[in-house]
Image (cartoon, grey):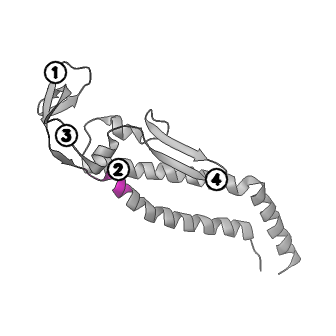
Amino acid sequence: MSIKSLEKWNRSLLKASSGEFTRQASGWLEQSGEDFLDLVREELIHSGGIDTENLLSSFRKGARDHVWIIENGGLTLEIGTNVEYASFINDGHWTVSEENVRWVPGYFQGSRFIYDPSASTGMALKKQWISGNGFWDKALLLYETIFARSLDKRFSKWLNTLGGDIG
């Protein structure tokens, strides 16, 4: 190894240790989160299991009911939604828990029921199991593959930029 290459390697290490690597990793992690949310929205639309935009729009960074936490130093990304019925759509649910009938406020537009908590009209639901569509699970499965490939590619790129022409 030449001295010039060693000096270049040392400068690269100093740059990485000054926070450059963490900044780049943080940016990549944030983009990865955005990519995952895109997949979640695509799977939700593909499943056909939504009647309103509330759940769909909650899977955006900065949305009212979103969960988006990044811890820069530890490179933690936590994403999701605070929309309370999201797990019901993903996992499935019983329409009624204990009772035999549950009242749901809202109104009909043609054959489509629109949930409206302030409505004086509505419908009575009898107890039955509604199967989930697994939109989150499907998006996560797809993303695990994409994320692994992206991490390998990004890590190789970081190592190449860090190492330069050592040899």
User: Where residue 23 sits in the image (x, y, percent)?
Assistant: 68, 51
Q: Are marks 2 and 3 in contact (CB under 8 Å)?
A: no
55 displayed left or right of 106: right
Q: Which mark is residue 151?
A: none
Q: Residue furthest right?
A: 3
User: Where residue 99 sits in the image (x, y, percent)?
Assistant: 16, 35
Q: Nearer the viewer, mark 3 or mark 1?
A: 3
- Residue drawn at x 51%, y 42% as measured from the top left: 68
Q: Nearer the viewer, mark 1 or mark 2?
A: 1
User: Where residue 102 sits in the image (x, y, percent)?
Assistant: 17, 32
Give the quadrant of residue 114: top left
97 displayed left or right of 28: left
Q: Which residues are magenta?
A: 132-139
Q: Are marks 1 and 2 in contact (CB under 8 Å)?
A: no
Amino acid marked by disc 2 = Glu
Q: Which residue is mark 2?
A: 42
**Which badge, 3 or 4, comes first in the chain's sequence?**
4
Badge 2 element: helix
Q: Which residue is mark 3?
A: 95
- Residue drawn at x 35%, y 50% as measured from the top left: 42
Q: Which residue is mark 4?
A: 74
Q: Are marks 1 and 4 in contact (CB under 8 Å)?
A: no
**Which badge, 2 or 3, comes first in the chain's sequence?**
2
Magenta highlight on residue 53: no
Give the quadrant of residue 1: bottom right
Magenta stretch, overall SS: helix
